[in-house]
Image (tube, rainbow, N blue to C red):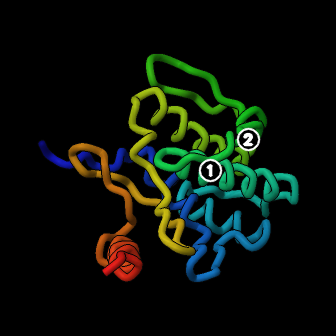
Amino acid sequence: MAPLELPEYLEPVLAFVNSMDVEEGTDELTDASALTTWLASRFGVDSGPASAREFRLALSLRSTLRGLALANHADVEPVDVSCFARLPFAASSGPDFEPQATDPIMRALTQLAIGYARAQAAGSWQRLRLCPGDNCYWAFWDSSPRGARRWCSMRVCGNRAKARTYATRPR
């Protein structure tokens, strides 16, 4: 069975979730201006700077998507998805959704929520995961045929986990 490719509509969602790198301690979305720049690079948003409200919504959306990705392979508390209610979109036909927002920033944020909704409708969201490695939490697409990949990288996080398990094994 061939590996499954990341759907095109999920590429910006994966990049958005990874705009915060826990292991490196970096965040591409430091303020409203950085959000505007990030959205312009991914969606071609041509507008004035994002408002403080839009910035807070973007951070809430990212946190929600990260929580939903982590829930794909870990027992976690239920994820608060209330931010989706502030991103207007409607089903148009089948798994297709149409953004209802007219403001460029809100429309781009809505596109990210639509990526999640499309993946849920297609049954592929469970393949977008967060690495459970120590201080990693990098989002990745599980392209393995059985959908059983656990680590962002077997060479890094997977190897660390296996080495830790080996070191604690009774001899």
**Residue situated in front as seen by the camera: 51 or 20:** 20
**Is residue 102 in sight in this rendering?**
no
Corner quadrant of residue 36 = bottom right
| Residue in view at x 40 percent, y 73 percent | 161
Q: How crowded is the residue under tag 2: few (<14 C-alpha within 10 Å), some, or many (20+)?
A: some
Q: Are marks 1 and 2 in contact (CB under 8 Å)?
A: yes
* Outermost residue, top side: 93
**Residue situated in front as seen by the camera: 109 or 160:** 160
Marker count (numbered): 2
Q: Give the left or right position of residue 52, taking residue 81 as reference.
A: right
Q: CA distance from mark 1 to mark 2?
A: 9 Å
* Outermost residue, left side: 1
Query: Residue 81's x, y, as percent?
Result: 71, 38
Q: How crowded is the residue under tag 1: few (<14 C-alpha within 10 Å), some, or many (20+)?
A: many
Image: 121 above or below 164: above
Image: 103 above or below 39: above
What residue did someone put label 2 on? 80
Q: Amino acid at mark 2?
A: Asp
**Residue situated in front as seen by the camera: 22 or 73:** 73
Element type where label 2 sits in the image? loop
| Residue in view at x 25 percent, y 46 percent | 4
Lower position in the chain sequence, tag 1 or tag 2: 1
Q: Amino acid at mark 1?
A: Gly
Query: Residue 115's x, y, as percent?
Result: 51, 41
Q: Give the left or right position of residue 96, taking residue 170 as reference.
A: right
What residue did someone put label 1 on? 67
On-image quarter of the N terminus: top left
| Residue in view at x 30 percent, y 70 percent | 154
Image: 69 above or below 110: below
Corner quadrant of residue 17 = bottom right
* Outermost residue, right side: 52
Element type where label 1 sits in the image? helix
